[in-house]
Image: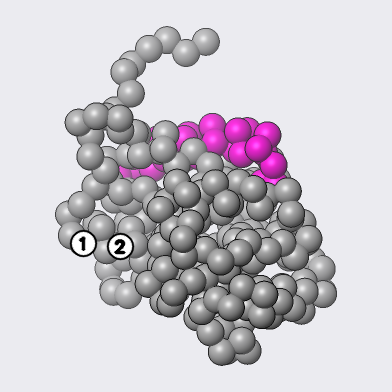
Amino acid sequence: MRILVVNPNTTGSMTAQIGACARAATSSPGITVDAVNPAHGPASIESHRDEVLAALGVIEEVEAGEAAGYDGYVIACFGDPGLLAAREIATGPVVGIAEAAMRTAAYLGRSFSVVTTLARTVGHAHDLTHLYGVAAQCAGIHACEIPVLDLETDPTARDRILQACKEALATDGSDAIVLGCAGMADLCAELSTTLGVPVVDGVAAATAEVEKLVRLGLRTGKTGEFATPPTKEIR
């Protein structure tokens, strides 16, 4: 089984970290997990404009993955940019990390809280809770006001994220935390141990979900909305 993890931004160091976290989530031998990012697009994704610019790169990487014979795909950005278009293109299943993380967290208690990067992304995350049918389980979405790229370079980032998680749990009375950025993936185990609650990383959750779907022989239905797009001239 071959799974392709697509980091929609163009920051290679983040792609490497995401790939390591995805590979750690696979449960069986014989699974290859590769991580890639587009050659063009935003260095980080923190706005609606960034998501639109990144979506084309996601589509191109999935098209390349189809040519290379991958069995399934992970979209490793919490906004899930390009997810629906990728499902049209891919033969196998495509899972976004926001959907996977929030659906997984909904299994772990009555409610969960999301801790994300910038406050300007909170509204879109709320929209996704409704789109994915977990709005009733999401008790709150909290921003730690750390830009995505600063997650790799700011020495205070871990402590600030931890504090935001503590405040979210206290404010919301929730049972679990969802990390609202692929760049936080490597913090999952440490935060869970410190907080004493389940902490869900969407990269791991999405990778495990793709593995499960491929093993079950399940893929996106192709008889309606997600049928392969008609061939047409693109200028």
Residue 136 appears in view: yes
For the record, the magenta segment spans 44-69
Q: Are marks 1 and 2 in contact (CB under 8 Å)?
A: yes
- Tell me the quarter of the picture where residue 119 sits: bottom right
Residue 222 % position (x, y)? 23, 34
Which scheme is used to colour this image of the protein?
A: one colour
Residue drawn 56% across the image and 66% down it:
139
Q: Residues within 10 Å of mark 2 (few under 14, many from 20)?
A: many
Q: Is residue 192 above or below residue 46?
A: below
How many labels sit on residues? Answer: 2
Q: Is residue 136 above or below residue 221?
A: below
Residue 7 appears in view: no
Q: Is residue 57 magenta?
A: yes
Residue drawn 52% across the image and 10% down it:
235
Q: In this figure, which residue is indicated by the disc labeled 1?
A: 215
Dot 2: what SS? helix
Give the overall secondary structure of the magenta segment: helix
